[in-house]
Image (spheres, rainbow, N blue to C red):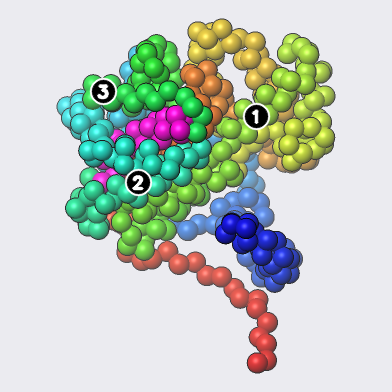
Amino acid sequence: MNKINWISNYVKEKEAVCRRNDDISPNLFEEYGVNQGLRDVKGNGVLTGLTNISKIISSHIVDGKKVSCDGKLWYRGYQIENLINSLGSEELGFEKIAYLLLMGEMPSSEEQEEFAKLIGKCRRLPTNFTRDVIMKAPSEDIMNSMTKSILTLASYDKKAKDTSVSNSLRQCIQLISEIPLLAVYGYNAYKHYEKNGSMIIHQPDANLSTAENLLMMLRPDKKFTSVEAKVLDTALILHMEHGGGNNSTFTTRVVTSSGSDTYSTMAASMCSLKGPKHGGANIKVMKMIQDIKANIRDVNDKEEIAAYLNKILEKEAFDGKGLIYGIGHAVYSLSDPRERIFKSYVEKLAVEKHREKDMLLYNTIEELAPDLIGQKSRIQKGVSPNVDFYSGFVYEMLGIPMELYTAIFAIARIVGWSAHRIEEMISADKIIRPAYMSIMEEKEN
């Protein structure tokens, strides 16, 4: 019997012991006024810090009552719709918006060009890193592979332990540049060694944007269209940052507050994001859509689609969880501003890829699901599609493998993590140390 089997047999017997001693009644949380998940009974987040990086609004107070409104999102004082619109139909803005989030102000033309060149020059891994680190022990879990690589990069940095603001900013910029390579090369190693695919490693092009490099490095022929690059660039911008209260960004600030280095901090944030309750939403949407397509006959039949969605809500179909994935958000109710922006880009890509029939199905689910969920759950705040309702569909149309969906999220969100790390270092000097109330019974020896 090998070690894993021996330990597995042992813990099977001990699981019941853990459950007996670790189960805390939900009534006690209410009795002591403890907010589970740092959310109160109305779903509002417990205030744990201040930030000048981004802002989210999903409601306002009218006559002393909380009233839901269309969601709004700001990056450094700029509304996200205005930022996206300012780029026009051709400009790819990942590097420009990354500068805005990191530095706190919009770059001039010269600063934007200088920063983009810097990102391009930094988009190189240490000599033999791909062979010695990424190709060793490849994993289907690309987030694990990337996290391992991020931690290993510290060994190549002579100033890895230097936690000065300037050095941390330098490390953040390097990681923003390098993380697309960690994702793509990690997937290519897995595809080759575990799935018997071809091993193709394209070197990045310093003259291409982050979105263009991702598409180029993933494709054997290196080719992509301007529409494809624009849609992916927009997806990356919309996923860059979302307030300080999401799980992975809070992780960034907690680990930063302990005085830890940049590599350890980003690795911790990666581990948070890979959790299916945080970064895996678009994968769940894609699997749900596949299930719906397999169980309906006509995408034009709204009654048939509504009936199957009800089956999902009744836990009689799909994964038995009773959830229509991609509909609803912890903060937004009437609408997610990222989804409102993204949908028009998704529709353009669907036309280019001749996927109008699939787009129709998404539109129908978006139309029907909120009312069906409202009838089932009797929720008052309402629900609407979130950005991840469409992001998986976009990645699929771009030929991006599902194993990379959460990795794409990380490639974008590391910009926000970096901004929050720098802000935490500059504006706060205390370790984040929340209180837990002990309900343990004292025992006699």
Question: In 3D space, how far apart are the residues under numbered discs 2 and 3 (Cα atoms)?
Answer: 21 Å
**Quarter of the figure that contains the N terminus:** bottom right
| Residues tagged 3 and 1 counted as in contact (Cβ below 8 A) | no
- Camera-nearest residue between 17 and 163: 17
* Magenta span: chief secondary structure: helix
Q: Earlier in the sequence, mark 1 or mark 2?
A: 2
Q: Earlier in the sequence, mark 2 or mark 3?
A: 2
266 to 306, vertically: above or below: below
Q: Is residue 396 magenta?
A: no
Question: In 3D space, how far apart are the residues under numbered discs 3 and 1 (Cα atoms)?
Answer: 34 Å
Residue 239 shows in the view: no
Q: Which residue is mark 2?
A: 150
Q: Which residues are magenta?
A: 171-193
Left or right, 441 with respect to 104, comes to right
- Label 3 secondary element: loop
Q: Residue at x 55, y 46 (%)?
A: 275
Task: Give the x, y percent position of residue 412.
Answer: 40, 35
Dot 1 amino acid type: Lys
Task: Give the x, y percent position of residue 216.
Answer: 35, 20
- Label 1 secondary element: helix
Label placed on residue 287 = 1
11 to 365, vertically: above or below: below
Dot 3 amino acid type: Asp
Q: Which residue is mark 3?
A: 205
Q: Residues within 10 Å of mark 3 (few under 14, many from 20)?
A: some
Dot 2 amino acid type: Ile
Task: Give the x, y percent position of residue 253.
Answer: 40, 55
Q: Residue at x 68, y 61 (%)?
A: 9
